[in-house]
């Protein structure tokens, strides 16, 4: 069991009543905090894990099914960063039943705001074109605060007893197209 904390904007869209005192998390990664963002006409939910700052992006609609769809998106995100499928499935199962609660950490909200800007830029400049692609990009986004995070994917891997990714062996991403200004 874990708390799925939501901003007031997301709680309103989900028509959910927050649990005033959620129980302590019973999964490895702990609590998640989510926000609803809009980029042009696209509505997305960004969820951030409190201890690791791992971000997961999913389409907002249908709002009532966000917690269930979040579980599926998290499973895929964990596999993407090298977590064994059995361990990823165990993590998602350990989160149930999820308790919907109000957001409470200003630090996590700061990370959510940083990720919202990243997602906006990635969509506008076509660096990613799907929720899964945006999730992949957020896993490698450098987080400056708290200082011990740096790469969220590495902190999530450590929660599963795995070493950080060896970035020297990862394929280089495609550089952005060159734009000339006149």
Image (cartoon, rainbow, N blue to C red):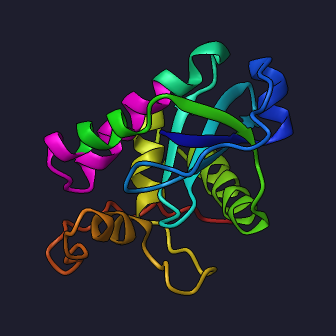
Where is residue 90 drawn, in percent x and y?
25, 40
Where is residue 84 drawn, in percent x and y?
14, 49
Where is residue 53 drawn, in percent x and y?
53, 63
Q: Quadrant of residue 39?
A: top right
**Nearer to the camera, 34 or 23:** 23
The correct choice, above or below, for 37 with respect to 83 in the image is: above
Q: Quadrant of residue 18?
A: top right
Left or right: 58 in relation to 21: left
Q: Is residue 35 visible?
A: no
| Magenta run includes residue 70 | yes
| Magenta run includes residue 58 | no
Magenta part of the chain: 69-87
The residue under the point 25% across, 43% down is: 88
Left or right: 136 in relation to 87: right
**Nearer to the camera, 47 or 25:** 25
The residue under the point 62% across, 57% down is: 118
The residue under the point 44% across, 67% down is: 152
**Nearer to the camera, 8 or 21:** 21
- The quadrant of the image that shows the C terminus is bottom right
The residue under the point 58% across, 45% down is: 47
Q: Is residue 179 visible?
A: yes
């Amino acid at each position: 069991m874990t708390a799925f904390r939501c901003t007031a904007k997301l709680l309103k869209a989900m028509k959910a009543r927050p649990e005033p005192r959620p129980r302590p998390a019973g999964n490895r990664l702990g609590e998640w905090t989510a926000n609803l963002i809009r980029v042009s006409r696209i509505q997305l939910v960004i969820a951030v894990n409190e201890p690791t700052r791992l971000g997961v992006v999913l389409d907002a609609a249908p709002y009532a099914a966000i917690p269930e769809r979040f579980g599926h998106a998290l499973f895929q995100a964990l596999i993407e960063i090298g977590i064994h499928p059995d361990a990823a499935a165990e993590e998602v199962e350990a989160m149930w039943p999820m308790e919907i609660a109000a957001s409470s950490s200003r630090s996590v909200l700061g990370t959510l705001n940083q990720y919202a800007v990243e997602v906006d830029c990635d969509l506008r400049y076509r660096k990613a074109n799907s929720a899964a692609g945006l999730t992949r990009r957020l896993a490698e986004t450098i987080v400056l605060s708290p200082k011990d995070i740096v790469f969220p994917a590495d902190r999530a891997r450590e929660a599963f007893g795995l070493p950080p990714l060896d970035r020297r062996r990862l394929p280089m991403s495609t550089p952005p197209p060159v734009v000339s200004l006149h």
